[in-house]
Amino acid sequence: MHIFDWFSMIGTVAFAVSGAIVAMEEGYDILGVLVLGLVTAFGGGVIRNVLIGVPVTTLWSQGSLIMLAVISVAIAFILPLSWITHWRRTEVFFDAIGLAAFAIQGALYATQMNHPLIAAIVAGVMTGIGGGIIRDILAGRKPLVLRDEIYAVWAMVGGFMVGTGFTKTPGQLIILFTGIVLFRMLSVYYKWKLPRRALDTGSSGTTAAAKPKRDYADWGTP
């Protein structure tokens, strides 16, 4: 089995279960859990295919991965609550695994089609975070990947390393995978954030710019 296939399997399982857990947190029924699990697992890949010119219908040729996602969601749905609670404690870790696996998989997909570096980076990012964004939107949440600790940047790093050819061999790809997971976990532990600027609004609807004491950018403070 090619390393590409292993990354696809790892990412599919990690994100399918992640979507299922979020759906159960929101009180969805079994159909909602299944839909959210599948969307999380394959949503990023569909967006990637649209961006790099791959027919969206190629999704239906991935029957084994779809079945793997369905089985993963089903197992998550019937697990004892104590097991699910334990999963939620390690949810960030498995989400990091899915991010790393899909970012590398997406970038490999683009490079195999001889697309330029920017396409490999975009493919890596969208494959890595697209499903999570759709999951959070369907669950009525603000997408965490765009406002939480550094997340999408690690997918960009993965896409860059693959797109430039720095990582080609299976061993190098495994090292890259491990590095993305490690740095994602470090960013959560140490709460690394990108610079951001928040504009507060008062009850009257005025922005923070109208308030002298709040007329400064929030550069990532908790």
Image (cartoon, rainbow, N blue to C red):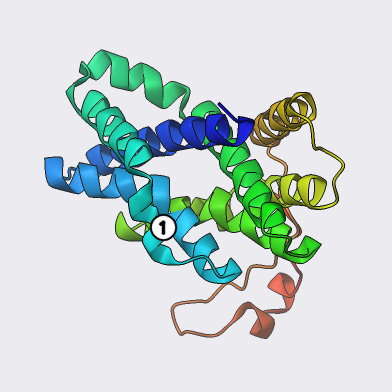
Front position in the image: 67 or 160: 67
At 48% across and 55% down in the image, what residue appears? 44
How far across and how far down the image is residue 26, in percent? Answer: 24, 45
- Is 137 situated above or below 22? below
At 35% across and 33% down in the image, what residue appears? 17
Q: Amino acid at mark 1?
A: Thr
Note whether residue 29 is visible. Answer: no
Front position in the image: 204 or 75: 75
Locate residue 58 relative to residue 123 in the image: left or right: left
Q: Quadrant of residue 194?
A: bottom right
Locate residue 141 relative to residue 195 in the image: left or right: left
- For the N terminus, which image quadrant? top right
Front position in the image: 218 or 27: 27
- Is 186 situated above or below 133? above
At 73% across and 78% down in the image, what residue appears? 212
- Is 55 situated above or below 11? below
How far across and how far down the image is residue 77, in percent? Answer: 20, 29
- The residue beneath circle 1 is 58
Q: Quadrant of residue 134?
A: bottom left
At 58% across and 49% down in the image, what residue appears? 148
Front position in the image: 39 or 210: 39
Label 1 crowd (10 A; few <14 / some 14-19 / many >=20): few
How far across and how far down the image is residue 71, in percent? Answer: 26, 29
